[in-house]
Image (cartoon, helix red, strand yellow):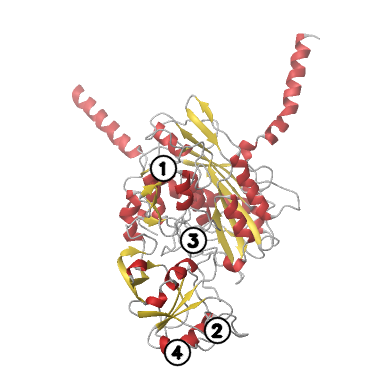
Amino acid sequence: MRGTSVMKRALLLLLTACLTAPLFAGTGKILIVNNDSGSTGFNDPTPATPVGGNPGTTIGAQRLNVFRAAAERWETLIETDVNIIVNASFAPISGCTETDAILGQAAPQSWKFSFANAPQQNIWYPIALANKFAGVDLEPNSADIFTQFNASLDNATCLGTTSWYYGLDGNHGDDIDLFVVVLHELAHGLGISGAASAPGFREGKPAISDTLTFDESLGLRWDQMSDVQRAVSVVNTGNLTWDGGNVKSIAARMLAQTTTLTITSPDTVARNYDIGTATFGTPANVASMNGRFVAALDATNVDGPATTDGCTTFTNIDSIAGHVAVVDRGTCTFVTKARNAQSAGAIGLVVVDNRRDTCTPPGMGNTDDASDIAIPVISISATDGDVLRGVLGGGVNGILRIDPTQLAGSAKSGRVRLYAPCTIQSGSSTHHWDVVASPNLLMEPNISSDLSHGVDLTLYQLLDLGWTAQPKSGRRLLKR
Amino acid sequence: MSRRLHAVLIATTFVAALPALAASDDSCTRELPRAAQTMTIAQHAESLFAKAEAVESIETDSGVTIELPAMEVVVARIGKDGKVILGCVDSATAAKRFFEADVANVPTKSPVEK
């Protein structure tokens, strides 16, 4: 009788334990600490109408709700037994005008090495991740992530009529979706960041993210390179990639296939080239451009000062007809160049970018009528243009195609490309995905306005850093 | 001075000093610089990263730690089409280029006209 009673109590205890167990493994939470004082930022008492699923009735409450919602998103995806403290502020920042603004900042509060249970020695880990490995809060007197956002954006004097959007439904219109920006910045705080401005190492030691940064040309990770090699690597557009197994294994499910320009001969320049597309003409897709590439020449006149700008009637029509014309960007519109190429009998047009401060081919729009343009028009970077122009005289052949081994945003190896502009430019290097990725990704530097509220590759990048995923988070992991 | 009066004076001094201590503790608040009017936004952004260069690590019982100011800064400009272009920069050079480049050359995924 007594044995039965003990058994019942044990079963009851077991049942209770099961019912009260947290929904997710790992007991740690991501906690937002309101660092604002008075009636600023998160405490702004200005009445507001609930918007897009955000029930807050003051501006301050709505801001805090967005932060908490973004933190909750990450909390349900990554696992830790140690609370992650986010030191957050939303006070006005003076860095804002009608046209330019600093909207905020975020980073790990601190970095650490040589701590208990560190997976690798002499590597900087962001404090939240270090805490996870150690199983305790290694810096209990300070936060783990800090963020600061600019409340001034809600004033007409800051970026004109553009404001923060505090809804949680993504219907931000022309405003900036705060939820997406916070989601992005918290990911930096969780470790998609560096302990020094790339390509430097802090006190001679790489950050954990540096150990996963790979140069396809050299076949080396950043922590295997010299300072000189890294300085070259950081501007090696298209060849700087993420060497993490989780991201690589999921990339094909996240990234679209892409149309690429494949130069097939001569061998010296045969490879895939990134292209920009046009909003007019025949869509640049498979086999819409297949043949010999020829430099177009035109007169030097008031409409176009160079013989290679394609701004007036081509003078080498006999060479162009039936082939793909190559012209330089500049002076006249893309549509004018395309019209001249089409009139010369070209089967397609390649516009070589004239900007030397970027290696990303431009997308080409049109404001005037382009309904008469029937040929495909693509652009390539100035750097790639140099390569092709150097051999055009000897005959260059190529085709637009979908290369099944290369995704929009990955290298031929399958590793996903990191943002490595050929000169250090707007948007940072290495801690973001390359802007050629398609569909757009949360951790691209320009935080595109068409992003949904998913975390796409970001979660897998965090797993590569050493975070573990909440079990059974199911399809949410794959939702974009 | 009696021991009691001495204790009261110390306590008063400590309480009076509290606000000053809190205001100077930028490791807690890390506010972006509220610089002089003459400072351009590009200079604002550059100053954020400049702070990080001077920081040194410290050794504690729990390992070696370094506390850094801003490493990822969200910046914005109004593009030629009147829409906002966002950028996330992690260096003074990248911030400077973002703000000082011809806005037509700031990378965006939107088609450009010319």
**What element does badge 4 sit on?**
helix
Would you place residue B23 above or below residue A292 in this image?
above
- Are discs 2 and 1 located on one and the same chain? yes
In the image, taking residue A356 as reference, residue A80 lies left or right, namely: left
Is B52 or B26 nearer to us in this picture?
Answer: B52
Q: Chain of mark 1?
A: A
User: Mark 2 to mark 1: distance in Å?
Assistant: 48 Å
Q: Chain of mark 2?
A: A
Q: Amino acid at mark 2?
A: Cys
Q: Amino acid at mark 4?
A: Ile
User: Mark 4 to mark 2: distance in Å?
Assistant: 14 Å
**Which percent across, then down, holds residue A424?**
54, 56
Look at mark 4 in the image and give the residue it sits on: A317
User: Mark 4 to mark 3: distance in Å?
Assistant: 54 Å
User: Mark 3 to mark 2: distance in Å?
Assistant: 46 Å
**What element does badge 3 sit on?**
loop
| Mark 3 / mark 2, whichever is N-terminal | 3
**Which percent across, then down, holds residue A23?**
36, 43
Look at mark 3 in the image and give the residue it sits on: A169
Are the residues at dot 3 and dot 1 in contact (C-beta closer than 8 Å)?
A: no
In the image, taking residue B104 as reference, residue A273 lies left or right, namely: left
Q: Quadrant of residue B113?
A: bottom right
Is A344 or A82 nearer to us in this picture?
Answer: A344
Q: Residues within 10 Å of mark 3 (few under 14, many from 20)?
A: some
Look at mark 2 in the image and give the residue it sits on: A311
| Mark 4 / mark 1, whichever is N-terminal | 1
Q: Quadrant of residue A387?
A: bottom left
User: Mark 3 to mark 1: distance in Å?
Assistant: 41 Å
Q: Residue at x 59, y 82 (%)?
A: A304
Q: Residue furthest top?
A: B2
